[in-house]
Amino acid sequence: MRLRPLAVGAMVAAGLLVPLRQDDSAAPRSPVAAARLVEDVSGPADLSWGKLRAWRRLGDGWLVLWQPSHGAWVLRAMVKDDPHPVRWRLQVAPWLPGVRLSEPLARELVGAGEAIDSRRIERLARRDWDLLRQRLAGGLALGQDLPEPPPSRLGPWPAMLAGAVLAGALCLVLLPGTLTQRWTVALTGALAGLVAVIPSVVAVGYPAFRVGVRPWVAQLAIFAAVSLVSTALAAFAARFGVLRGRPRALELGVAAGLGLVAGRVAPAEALISVAGLTARPVVWLAVTVALGYLAAVAAIGLRELLHPVRRLRLPFLASLLVAAAATAGSWLGPVAATLVAAAGPRSRACWTATTLVGFWIVGGTLASCAWVEPLRDAGLLLLGGAGVLVTLAAVEQ
Amino acid sequence: MAVACCAAAAHLTLGRGIGGREVAVDAVRRAFAGLDYRPVGVPEVAFVGNQELAWAMEWVRREGGPAATSGGALLWRIQFPGGGEGAATPDGAVWAARRPIPADPGPNHFPTTVQRPLRETLARVFPDVEQWRWTAGQSWREGDVTWHRVTFTIPAAGLPQGWENSIEVEMAGSAVVSFQRHTEPLASDVGVVMGRIAELELLRSVGLLGLVLVLIGVIVAGAEQVAFRRQGPLFAGLVVGGVTWAAGTAAGLAPWECALGAVVSGGVIGLLPRPADQFSSRLLLAAPAGIVAALALLALPQLVAVLGGWLPVRSSFPPQYGVSVLAGRMWFPALTEEPLLRGALPFLAAPIAGWWGGALVGALVGCLLHPVPAVPLAASLAAELGLHLGMAAVARWGGLACAILARGVCEGLIRRTSFPAGGAADALILGSVVVALLAGLRHGKRRQA
């Protein structure tokens, strides 16, 4: 009996099938389809919207954004998964000229009653009105307020990861072991691929598209930021390297199963946004290799930090994993990869962490997207990844 | 060479500041005299610059030479200790005035009859008042005094086409108490500038991301030094960090910026294994390099104009003015960016991309940090890139300390036009050049010895 391949396959299947309580249902449509819905049914009719530039998953809906090439206005819309009604909001540069309407005329234009409060904003060459939730820029209706994305708060888990990465980098210098540069080459290649497809990736850079900023400048800023981070990561990997080690199929099977569970427990909103891209496999690959590498370095650091209590290391890491499952949210994937890789030997940390991160992406995508393209790609990756793991287990046996 | 450097620095400094202080004070005094008010005491005079308006004016007049001082973009605000304040442009046009309310403001006027006495009173200050167009007026009563507030549209002499000028006048009884002029620029002209300011803010955030990444590299490399118990020049790092903190405080920066700058510069100097040691230090290069870089940057707007673009002549106005602010604005970027971009980054990148590879990345990051609006935007980025590449060359052939000195001298010379004229500011910049030269001469003698 070939038990090891069966065990690995069972772990992957368990990660996929174990029942979990999920608060959020999967997104039923892609961001492009959501944008098409807005174009068909709603939005300001007497204005050029420009191109669909960016999107972002927010709660149970898509925030989609259009901007013309001059950048003087931005149209944002919120398309809930139950899309009625679609809400949209126009933001206009403060210097754009317009008319100066009187208050009665402004009320009449937006259909507001006399009783509501009004606020007048004098601009350089126009007058804006804020009539409760309805706004006018000159004579242009700006639509309704949209829900704001919550302010990003990093919390304790990223801080723990950062500290562990620093410790891991020092460990790789002080206690180097046998280093290999193959992971560095793989990481550099994956990041170079990401940089090459940036024109297809800028759509997830939602915050960069601002009123008054021409879209090509926003795209240039995203390109520069991604290039900088990629270069820094590649340089970091080239400086510190990775410990050489052969992967073990059972460890990778555990990592794959846990990764799938982590992705299903807390799908990251950023990953759902990435699922809307056509270049999603390239981004998944780059994120998998980059986060996997960083998680491996963090795992090496965490392992050495726990050296004084090495007998309690496994229970401590397990309790941290349980705590992370409850509180880490979108960071669950990298945190779980670090903790699981820290439980194993240093030389296999990169294999374990990368596997967990890769299956975390697949699990998150399968759990949070209900339109066909990302499901197809994630399904293919799942089958391919599981096949590789089972084959590895068979070869090992 | 020292004499040539001093002469060039004097040419770029003396008479380049924003002048017209005395002219503005006299103009405001004359305006008060026209309003039958004699201010007493020596006034406090402060410069106020409207950045967007100034750049918009430069943009409109890009083919007509240097920016005009009209339009209220540059103002001297004058406050008399005994009451009364006003503002005037450097060329003596009174922009605003407010006098104390007189004990007996004279007989009240009806709203329908106020125009004539108002114009007669204003004619003592503004001879062209008959050409003004009444736009709006309101009146109200406070006690026994009737107040009138009137807005006139005035001929926009000296302003670009499409721009408008208005004046708001307040009258109590028969006395004009205050007036304030407003410039309403053509929205599209201001839009060019405001849009580019927003774009550069976005690009600056990428530059700051680059600095943060380099700082992380410094922290990791510093931790490595500590782990291997390698002793760095910690005292020098502390001193440089303290000087950087003082420069940031003098520049009026936020405390967190000062602290971060101090940590950056002190960390690079104190923790990293002296990145400049691999090159011989030639401090004598600092002052000439800084002056040459400033000359090139100051000549660039004309070159861009010849090529059909626009690059502002004047650099950005600081939030406050003063010699200490100028000193901070000169040396804070020199003390933070040079160690990070010309010291730490090439040192960290050297094993992978070589020193010049790291310096090139540093120049690309640095060119995003302080660009000014330009048309096309690439002109400004190219100007900043040129400055940072020049500083990289200085650091390569003169050492890190040389690059810091050169950058400080260069920043002082190119920022001179954004600060008010005055002997103290001129002395600060020229003194910096002299100090850089003396440091170079002393260092050269020590090397020879």
Image: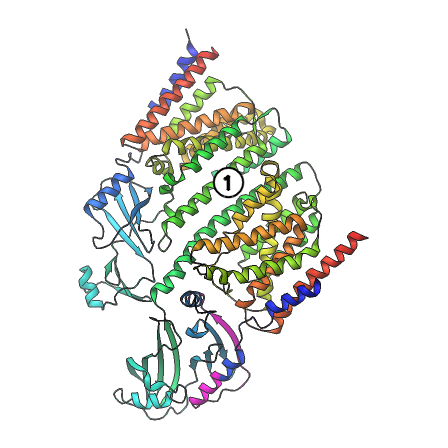
Residue B68 image position (x, y, % from top left): 45, 72
Mark yes or no: residue B80 visible.
Answer: no
Where residue B103 sits in the image (x, y, percent)?
Answer: 41, 90
Observer-nearest of A18 and B271: B271
**Of all residues shown, which one is farthest toward the right?**
B449
**A99 relative position to A20: left or right:** left
The residue stretch that appears in magenta = B27-52
View extreme (front): residue: B306
Left/right placement of residue A200 relative to residue B425 reads left
Find out whether residue B439 is within the magenta segment: no
Q: Nearer the viewer, residue A268 or A159?
A: A268
Q: Position of residue B164 (x, y in %)?
A: 34, 73
Direction from residue B26 to residue B282 in the image, left or right: right
Q: Residues within 10 Å of mark 1 (few under 14, many from 20)?
A: few
Residue at 64% x, 50% y is B395
Residue lying farthest to the top in this orientation: A1
- Res B174 seen here: yes
- Viewer-side residue, B225 vs B435: B435
Colour treatment of the image: rainbow
Q: Toward which corner of the image does residue B177 lie, by quadrant?
A: bottom left
Write down the residue under mark 1. Answer: A159
Q: Nearer the viewer, residue A169 or A274?
A: A274
Q: At 22% across and 53% down in the image, what residue appears?
A: A44
**Amino acid type, callout 1:** Ala
Image spot of residue B129 (x, y percent): 35, 85
- Is residue B78 placed above or below A21 in the rendered structure? below
Q: Is residue A93 above or below residue A379?
A: below
Tell me which corner region of the image, top left, top right, bottom left or bottom right, holds residue A336: top left
Label 1: element kind: helix
